[in-house]
Image: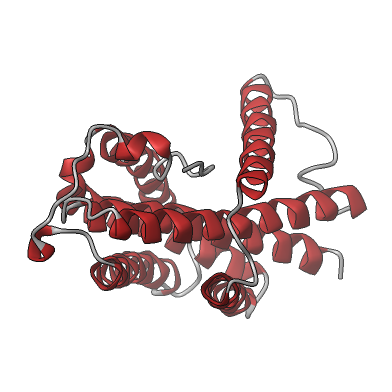
Amino acid sequence: MRTANPALNEGAFGGLERVWDTDKAMTLQGTVNKAGVLLLLVALSAGWTWHLFFSGPTPDPASVMPWMIIGAIGGFIVALVTVFKQSWAPVTSPIYALLEGLFIGGMSSLAESQYPGIVIQAVGLTFGTCFALLVAYSSGFIRATENFKLGVVAATGGIAIVYLISIILSVFGVQMPFIHDNGLIGIGFSIFVVVIAALNLVLDFDFIETGARHGLPKYMEWYAAFGLMVTLIWLYIEILRLLIKLRSRD
């Protein structure tokens, strides 16, 4: 089962045996419940940094910047730990959600201070996209065929390479042209990334459904919910970036 999400890939099933006791096996409903818990934790920590940013007489970026750095670096480290130690997911997944919430809350508050109303638009588009793709997947309108998976995986890998090159160049003070600008090329690139991030949700749904059908251990509900959060957070960030580019052209 191929998926571009590094948390939800073929290796996640490696060495896992089917659990025949239904009370100890992964289920769709159990995964949904865990995903709801993680979303709540993201919202709570994001709300805290949001409040921190706007609680003073004037919005203060310095008040949230340290928490954004802690959230970004800490979330990345915890995500790596979760990927390599799947059985730890019941503990590491909530920690990941809280850390990512710190980063998202800070990033969102900064964007909101410049472009009022942009965050609610990004949130609405993120969950609207997720719901639409879930309906399309459940109805069979979109199928996670091997060719579909291969295309999404290849596109996601290409995006990752571009971002990695951009980060390396920025370390040396070089800005990669076009993709971060609000010109037509930059907006087109962001639209492409948003589409690919959204299509990764289909692969995540397929992974979760297959995992439940195979009767994986119960802790895989947390792991699958964690993988879904990785994609949703990426999708939200990319939608927010796209909206910032569009609003900055006004």
* Residue 73 in the image: above or below residue 166: below
- Which residue does the image show at 62% across and 57% down from the upper left? 199
Quadrant housing residue 150:
top right
Q: Nearer the viewer, residue 75 or 161?
A: 161
* Extreme-right residue of the structure: 184
Q: Nearer the viewer, residue 146 or 59?
A: 146
Q: Is residue 188 visible?
A: yes
Q: Nearer the viewer, residue 170 or 85?
A: 85
Q: Quadrant of the C terminus?
A: bottom right
x, y percentage for residue 87? 17, 42
x, y percentage for residue 82? 27, 40
x, y percentage for residue 34? 25, 66
- Which residue does the image show at 45% across and 73% down from the upper left? 54
Residue 120 placement, left or right of 9: right
Residue 144 placement, left or right of 230: right
- Which residue does the image show at 83% across and 49% down from the upper left? 186
* Extreme-top residue of the structure: 172
- Which residue does the image show at 60% across and 74% down from the upper left? 136
* Residue 158 in the image: above or below residue 3: above
Quadrant housing residue 76:
top left
In this figure, what is the number of numbered marks? 0
x, y percentage for residue 169? 68, 23
Q: Is residue 63 visible?
A: no
Q: Nearer the viewer, residue 169 or 34?
A: 34
Residue 201 placement, left or right of 166: left
Residue 117 placement, left or right of 108: right
* Residue 12 in the image: above or below residue 184: above
Image color mode: secondary structure
* Residue 158 in the image: above or below residue 39: above
